[in-house]
Image: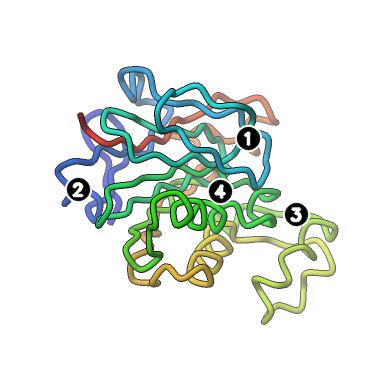
């Protein structure tokens, strides 16, 4: 369940039960969120996932980052792309993911699940994942060259050979389930950034020149 707090940051009730965790999905009204110096990615719409343990300096561009370091906050920036936050409740490891259409096609969310398993021995069934505010399936229109790349994730659809709409949230949800995350542990239902442009930056609504929202997840010291 998503709700907006007094800071104009969207929180997820399922993640608030972990007293050692800080998280949130920022809006265009949440100035100063998050505080401190969160890890920031050089986002390039890739399938690259990096680790931010030890030094917070990352070795290069990426679109997902993981950590189990106390006091470390991970962040991604979006304006219609899909922000995804993950937490391993058993081992206290976290991930932040930026999933645009290119990253979604390359299964960036699943790559983050794999990275958590490889680095910390996280089990997909122990993860809780929140898929945050992004452009919704009704607003996100794409041409045939993009649409056809989603056929594997929407096998029931017969319209992906022409201009149509794509639900990036649902594509990522399906990929997470395929990666072993239980469907009941994936939190969806966040607002659409394009529909609610008064509180979110939207690449589509602004003609390609928006600001960016920050979504972040951190392990408290």
Find numbered disc 1 in the image and state the secondary structure of the residue it sits on: loop
Whether residue 104 sits left or right of residue 109 in the image: it is right
Whether residue 7 sits left or right of residue 85 in the image: it is left
User: Which mark is nearer the camera, 2 or 4?
Assistant: 2
Residue at the disc numbered 3: 142
Query: Where on the picture, by quarter, is residue 75?
Result: top left
- Whether 170 is drawn above or below 18: the answer is below
Q: CA distance from mark 3 to mark 4?
A: 12 Å
Q: CA distance from mark 4 to mark 1?
A: 9 Å
The residue lying at 44 percent from left, 24 percent from top is: 56
First in sequence, mark 3 or 4: give its number.
4
Q: How is the image coloured?
A: rainbow
Which x, y percent locates residue 196? 47, 42
Q: CA distance from mark 2 to mark 3?
A: 35 Å
Residue at the disc numbered 4: 135
Residue at the disc numbered 1: 203
Quadrant where the C terminus is found in the figure:
top left
User: Which mark is nearer the camera, 1 or 2?
Assistant: 2
């Amino acid at each position: 369940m998503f709700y907006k707090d007094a800071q104009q940051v969207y929180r997820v009730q399922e993640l608030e039960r972990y007293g050692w965790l800080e998280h949130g999905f920022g809006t265009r009204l949440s100035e100063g969120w998050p505080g401190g110096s969160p890890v920031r990615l050089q986002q390039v719409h890739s399938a690259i996932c990096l680790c931010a343990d030890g030094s917070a300096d990352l070795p290069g561009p990426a679109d997902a980052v993981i950590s189990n370091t106390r006091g470390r906050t991970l962040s991604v920036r979006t304006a219609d792309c899909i922000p995804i936050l993950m937490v391993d409740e058993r081992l206290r490891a976290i991930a932040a993911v930026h999933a645009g259409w290119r990253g979604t096609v390359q299964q960036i969310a699943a790559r983050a699940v794999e990275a958590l398993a490889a680095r910390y021995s996280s089990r997909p069934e122990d993860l809780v994942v929140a898929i945050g505010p992004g452009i919704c399936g009704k607003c996100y229109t794409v041409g045939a060259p993009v649409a056809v790349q989603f056929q594997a994730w929407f096998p029931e659809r017969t319209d992906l050979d022409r201009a149509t709409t794509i639900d990036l949230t649902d594509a990522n949800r399906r990929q997470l389930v395929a990666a072993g995350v239980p469907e009941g542990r994936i939190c969806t239902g966040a607002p659409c950034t394009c529909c609610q442009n008064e509180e979110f930056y939207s690449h589509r609504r602004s003609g390609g020149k928006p600001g960016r929202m920050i979504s972040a997840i951190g392990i408290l010291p």
